[in-house]
Amino acid sequence: MPTTNWVLDYAENRCRIVREFASPDGNEKTVLFFEQQVPEQSYTWLVAGSAVPNRSTISVRFGPVNQTRETPGRQLSFGQFEQAIRGTGFSPTLSSVAGSRKKSSENRLRESTSRDGAPSTTQSSMPRPPVESIEWLDIEAGTRNAVRIPLAEMPQIAKAMESCMDDLVRSWGVDPAQQAKVAHPPKWKNLDHVAQRIVNTYPDKAARRGEQADLQLRLMIEASGEPSKCVRTNLTQADNFDNSACLAIMKDAEFEPARDTEGRPVRSYLVQRIKYILP
């Protein structure tokens, strides 16, 4: 049962909405949040606490419209709630890992960049139902009965997140109404070259300590195609990772600008995810 209201966090680089839950006796506590760093059709989500089994594989279902998906357990902790699981989107996904150096730099950087050139890519296996149609979240593992978290307020959550994201986009100096008219987002012109530079500049301190990181870069691309800003946001802890990826992009990257429905070049943003992975 819920023990708090939904709390919307207007942060500098993201929108996050959080609620806490507890068992009827109040002894077992769980926290759930949804998060976005850029406007998109789905959310990153995290569940932590007693609802998360201590198992290697956990079944998650955002019902009733989505099917069950398997997610790795024991993957992270979240403060006082300890055991946590995290994912992106609500439908099952197909994942593939490509370990060949022959893979093009464009494909490597489209989803991730690693020191040895081994990327991982993820794509949706089916169209995502609308977020507003979600009514509950079930979590189960093995023979343990499913824990159900009620989500009857998803339509209100979606509206609140949309409002927060509009404010966030405005803080970047971009008009959300204008962005709604973008028919073609910015496009890389020399991705191979920039990807190779990033692959070759794995931060030394992080490499010595065997550290890996999952980063996201938000690039502002002017109507001329020139990148004017690069902001790094960390999807994982990344204390020893510097801004070398942003520096490489700002120095060498070339883009085709975004274009609106009438074909005119417009200022817009591009999000690039980079995974630093040691062999």
Image: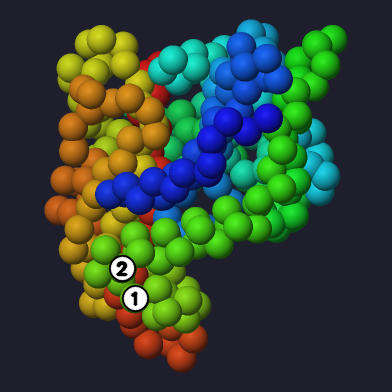
198 displayed left or right of 152: left
Element at badge 1? loop
- Residue carrying label 1: 175
Kindly give the residue lying farthest to the front in the view shown: 25
Side of 50 where 198 appears, left or right: left
Could you tell me if the residues under marks 2 and 1 are in contact, i.e. CB atoms within 8 Å?
A: yes
Residue under the image location 83 percent in, 44 percent down: 64
Residue under pointer 2: 170
In the picture provided, is 59 more to the left or to the right than 76? right
Of 258 and 35, the residue lying toward us:
35
Spot occupied by residue 11 in the image (x, y as percentages of width and height): 32, 47
Q: Residues within 10 Å of mark 1 (few under 14, many from 20)?
A: some
What's the residue type where badge 1 is placed? Asp
Q: Residue at x 75, y 46 (%)?
A: 135
Image quadrant in which the N terminus is located: top right
Which residue is found at the position 62% from the left and 17% from the top?
26
Above or below, 133 against 177 in this view is: above
